[in-house]
Amino acid sequence: MIALPSRKARVESPIDTRAFDLLGLTMALVLGLHAAHLPWWLGIALALTLGWRWWQRRRHIGRVPRWLKLPLLVLLTLAVIAHYGNIFGREPGTALAIGLLVLKLLETESARDVRVGVSFACFALMAALLFDQGLIVTVTVALGLLPALATLRALEPAQAQVTLQRSLLPGLGLLAAALPLALLGFLLVPRLSSPLWGAPSPRDARTGLSDNMSPGDFTDLLIDDHPAMRVSFEGAPPPPDQRYFRAYVMWDYDGSRWKYVDIVNREPVELQASRTVGYQVSMEPTHQYVLPMLDVPLDAPANAGLRQDRVVMADKPVNDLLAYAGRSAIQYRLQPELGIGMRQRGLSLPAGFNPRTLALGQSWRQRHGTDDAAIVQAALALFHNGGFRYTLSPAPLGRDAMDDFLFDTREGFCEQYSSAFTVLMRAAGIPSRVVTGYQGGYWNTLGKYLLVRYSDAHAWSEVWLSGRGWVRVDPTGAVRPQRVSLGAAAAADGQLPWYENGWLQSLRNRWDIVNRWWGQGVIGFDALRQRGLLTPFGIRDADTATLGVLLAISCVLFIAVGLGWALLRRQVRDPLRTALRELEHKLARMGIVRRPSEGPQHYLSRAARALPGQRDELALLMKCYLELRYAHDEPPPESLHDFQRAVRDFRTARMVK
């Protein structure tokens, strides 16, 4: 009767310190990559747990007791539910997965635990691409696989102790070898028409401009340095003071907030253009309908409509990177004739708000009579000479916000100035409205495009003057001209040092050309572009079947080339066999010649008997050779190098007769 091994005998032996440390490093990288997506308190708690487990295993090898793991698991689940409301969705699911990954380290002691942890860590690494698919994040995710691969290699038998850098090199070679196959899959695997599992766009946290505005709403935008859109022009770009990109035109004011009303049924107002410019826009996802257009657009792009006041609205929300063309007027007369209804709308003010502001506007009308242009200049002179200050951190305003701003705080940015100016104009009897969009941008000379960031968000006013129609007036420029001529960074004036630093700003703007290429060539490679991939070869629309056939053929060719290269490499260059032959030559000089039918083990055993003074050295060489040859499909580079070095250092002594 055959005795079965006891349960105790079947228990795996604990992993060594190197494998545990590499797994901990892998989990630390995953946690660091997701830190921005986790609640700050959860990120700190998981980092402390990870560090405590590493310290605890240094003192005592063994799993953390179950009575401690189970409460931590329950606490993690309850914390995620309390913060997000559930455990489903991208953010709560990721937080729960990262927490479970860290808790997995508490029970990691066997090779099986390590393999499960590495697999889970790789999945969590890929989950980072649900939040951001930029070049830096993608490269970071790829490099994050290196410690995971090194962890798996550390589980192999007969692994020599090497430095951390050397343990990561084999994984780097594997990633490089996988690039051709990854490129093949990127080009030929059929694209889905919608994201997998209905996953939202990775950039939905940035919605850009809103269809309503209250003083203070722009603060988050003005400190957001991420790109909003990139614009290429037909010919030279317009000068900075003409780089106004119209988004929303807001008429309705309730005393605290301006609001845009999307009026679809009315025809666009009259436009007489004397100078126009054509351009192409590549717009980042905003999940809104509005398409910012330069100054006053002549028409709407495809799949969009031109609303009243020359506002352009897309037929569906911009959930992905969108490219569209436009032509706009930068010298024009917009609506030379104003109807009674629109005039009343442009003069409307809520009752019971801002009495001092209304009185100031009415006094200008009494002073200047019918000269509307003089009233406009009086308001601009007030902002320029009245002790007003441009700041991104203005004092809070009360119920009569415009009174507080004009007569008390006298500090703010574009929202406060455009709101106050528009209310003053209406109080003086001049039809006016607020326009929001973007102003300025950085001209990338190398890429030949204008980079507009969210921090370039801006608000200005339009006033209706007899014989001229709607005229743009930017009251912020009267207070801080640098905001119009030099951009948002120059206007900050020391309030955002990280943003105003000249060297960092130049580097950031120049690096954007790489982001643009990545966005257009990789992120923007959708199903439509994939179907046109074979157009240069005469195939105008490559359907799924065609792509599948090409993918299968390419994979077969790739495998054949890889197999042929591996076989040729094994035949042409076998470093382990070369090292053994070098040892055989050294032993042959002492008369110990290997027989044709003699295997390496018998040969080296015979040599050890003939050289008793080097018996231990030869026994170790024999053991290393057998492990390298038969314990691995491919001998580990580190162990192979150690064996080669030992053979070179081997010196034969006198043979026993």
Image (spheres, helix red, strand yellow):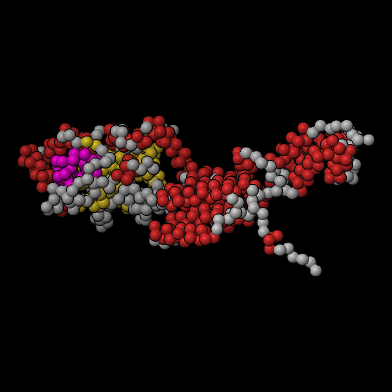
Residue 567 appears left or right of 217: right
Q: Which image quarter is the N terminus in?
A: bottom right
Q: Main secondary structure of the magenta part?
A: helix
**Observer-nearest of 593 and 211:** 593
Residue 584 among those drawn in magenta? no
User: The C terminus appears in which quarter of the rendering?
Assistant: top right
- Which residues lie in the magenta part? 401-426
Seen at 40% across and 33% down, the residue is: 504
- Please, which residue is most extreme toward the front here? 59
Query: Which x, y percent locates residue 526?
Result: 48, 51
Residue at image coords 19%, 36%: 388
Q: Where is residue 391 shown, x and y percent of the image? A: 26, 38
Res 535 visible: no
Q: Which residue lies at the image location 72% right of the left edge and 38% below the top edge? A: 642
* Quarter location, residue 567: top right
Q: Nearer the viewer, residue 170 or 155?
A: 155
Q: Is residue 418 magenta?
A: yes
Which residue: 58% across, 55% down?
63
- Viewer-proximal residue among 93 and 298: 93
Q: Name, please, the residue furthest toward the top.
A: 503
Q: Is residue 513 visible?
A: yes
Residue sitting at the far right: 657
Q: How many numbered marks, from 0 up?
A: 0
Q: Nearer the viewer, residue 594 or 554?
A: 594
Q: Is residue 591 left or right of residue 541?
A: right
Residue 296 is situated, as x and y percent measured from the top left of the image, at: 28, 44
